[in-house]
Amino acid sequence: MEQNTKVKISSFKKTFRLYKYVKPYWPAFSLGLLFLFLSSIANLAFPKLLGQLVDAGTGKKMAEAINHTGLLLVGILVAQGIFGYLRIILFVNVTEKSLASLRQHIYNHLIQLPMRFFSGRRVGELGSRISSDISLLQETFTTTVAEFIRQLIIIVGGIILLLNTSLYLTLLMLSSLPVIMVIAFFFGRIFRRYSKKAQTQVAEANTIVEETLQGILNVKAFANEFFEMKRYKKKTTEVAHTGIKAGTFRGVFAASMILGIFGAMIAVIWQGALMIAAGKLAAGMLFSFILYSSFIGASVAGLAEVYASIQKSIGATENLLEILDEPAEPITDSAKIAPEHQLTGQISFNRLTFRYPSRDDLQVLEDISFDIAADQQIALVGPSGAGKSTIVSLLLRLYDPVAGNILFNGKDISSFPLSAIRSQMAIVPQDVFLFGGTIRENIAYGRPDAPVEELIAAAEKANAWEFIQRFPDGLDTIVGERGVQLSGGQRQRIAIARAVLKNPRILILDEATSALDAESERLVQDALEKLMEGRTSIVIAHRLSTVRQADKIIVLDKGHIVEQGSHQELVRMEGGLYKNLSEMQFTH
C-alpha cells in the first residue's frame, strides 16, 4: 500500500511539472482563480438566501423581506454569471498559450534527440503524443483543474455552513463520505489504467494511418488496401473495447455514487422532517440544509469525475514526460562557427569499433583505420551490410563509436560542437527525401537565408535549372509528398543543388546514382563531379564505374577493411574482393 501511495504521489508530481508552462501567465491565471473563488462563494450564498426566502413567507413584513431577499438573489446571480464568464476567458487564454508553449517545447526537444531514440520508435506514435496527448491535457488545464478547485470550495464551505445549521444532520450526511471516497479512489485507479491503455492504442492506430499515407505508393502497388483496412479496423476496435470497458466501470461508479449521495440525502430529509415536527428546526433552515447537501453531493460526485479526468491526464503526462526526460543532443547555432572549429577536410579513423545500441550483440565495424587528406576523393565499396553507411553515420556523429576515435584536423571529433561538424558536411543520399513544399524551399534547405540568385546558380550547377524552368511555376512548383511529382533523376538533382548551396567542406555521396536510368545518371554524375571539386568527398558506391577516378578506394567486408588503394592497384590484386566485384560488374 505504501509503495502504491509513493507511485501516486510521484505521478501527481510529474503532472505538476507541466505547470511550469503556466508560470509566464501566472498573473492571468491567478486572476482567473480569484474569479473562480468569488463565483464559488456566490454559489454557496444561494441555499442560505433561498432558505431565508422560505422563512420570509412566514414572518412579519412578508412582502418587504421577500422582495429584499429576491433582489439580493438576482444580484448574486448576475455577479456569478460575470465571474464565471471572466474566469473561463482567462483560463482559456492561459491554457491555449501554455499548450502552445508545451507543444513547441516537446517538438523542439524531440527534434534534438539522438538517432538511437528514433531507431526504436515509429513516426505515427510520436505524432500522436504531440497531438492527442496534448489535446487531453487541454481539457485538464481549461476545465478539470478549475472544477477541482470549485468543487473543493463548495464542499469545504458547504460543510462549514451545514455545521452552523445543524450539527446532528451534518454528521448524519457526512457519514456517507468515507464510503464515497473509497469508491472514488478505487475507480480512479481503474480509469487511469484504461486511459493510459487507450492513449497507447490511439497512438498505434495513428501510426498505421501515418505509415500507410506515407507509403501509399507501396500500398497501391501491392494491392494491400484491404489488408491495411483490416489492420486499422483491428486497432480502432481495440480502442473502442478499451473505451467500453472504461465506460462500464464509469457506469458502476456513477450508480454507486448516486446510491451513496441520495441515500444520505433521504436520511437527512427524514430526520429533518422529524425535527421540524418536534419544533427543533425551521422549515427554511431544512430547505437550506437540503440545498447545501445536494450542492455538496453534486460536488463530491463531480470531484470523483474530475479525479477520473486527472487520472487520464496523468497517463498522457507520463507519455509526454518520457519524451522530455530523454537526453537531447548538445545543439548549437551552426551560423556561428568558431575559427578553431572550421574543418580543413582532413579526416582520420583510428582503430574504430562500433555496434548499434539496439543490436549490441552484433559488431558492425571492427578495428577500422584509414586517413583522408583534405580535398581527396575517397570511395567506400563492398557488399551490402559491410558497414559503408555506418561510417557515414559516425562521421555525422549520429552515433558514437564503441572503441577507437575519429579525428578532424588531427583533433578528436568530440572536441568539435555537433552542429559545427554537421553544418560543414552535406550528404546526397540514394533515397532522396524532399519536403512536400516547393522546389525553392527544398533547395533553400541547404541554406535557408540564401538569395534567389544563389538558388538559381546552385540549380544550374546541379543540372537542375533546365527542367525547373520547364515547369509553369518554376522554383515555386509543388513537389508533392516526399517529391512524388518529380522523377528519380530530378529529385536527385534537387538534392545536389541543396548540397551545392550549402557549400560543404566535406561531401558524402551515398549510392547517389544507383537507382537512375542512363540519361539521368549522366546528368547527375556530371553535377556530382562539379560538386566534388575543391572539397573532401566520400563516395559510397555499388557501381564501381563511378569510383574509378577516386584517389583512394577502401574495400569493406563484414565490418573490416580488407583492401585499400587506387583502382589500378586494386584490380591487380589476385583473388582480391575489389577485383572480383569489378570483374562481375564489367563482364556482364
Image (spheres, rainbow, N blue to C red):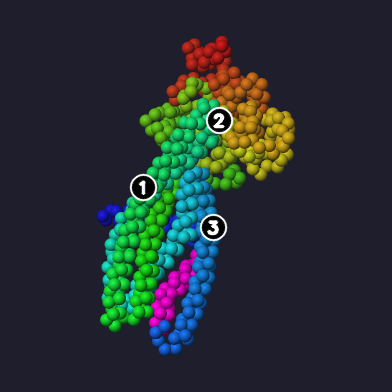
Along the viewing direction, whichever of 184 and 286 lies nearer the viewer: 286
Image x and y of residue 118, in percent: 47, 39
Q: For the residue marked with disc 2, what is the amino acid?
A: Leu
**Which quadrant would residue 432 be assigned to in this image?**
top right
Q: Gap between marks 2 and 3, in whole Å?
A: 39 Å
Helix, strand or loop at mark 3: helix
Q: Does residue 473 show up magenta in the picture?
A: no
- Asked whether residue 54 is drawn in magenta, I would say yes
Residue range corresponding to the magenta coloring:
28-56
Q: Amino acid at mark 1?
A: Lys
Residue at 44% from the left image edge and 86% from the top image edge: 62
Which percent across, then down, holds residue 291?
38, 72
Q: Quadrant of residue 120?
A: top left
Check disc 1 and report the residue beneath it: 245
The residue identified by callout 2 is: 217
Disc 2 on helix, strand or loop? helix
Mark 2 or mark 1: whose residue is earlier in sequence? 2
Q: Position of residue 121 (x, y in %)?
A: 45, 39
The residue indicated by pointer 3 is 97
In the image, 358 versus 491, the foreground residue is 491
Q: Counting other residues with Cα less than 10 Å from the Cα at mark 3, is it few (<14), some (14-19), or many (20 or more)?
A: some
- Which quadrant is home to the C terminus? top right
For residue 118, above or below residue 150: above
Q: CA distance from mark 2 to mark 1?
A: 38 Å
- Mark 3 or mark 1, earlier in chain: 3
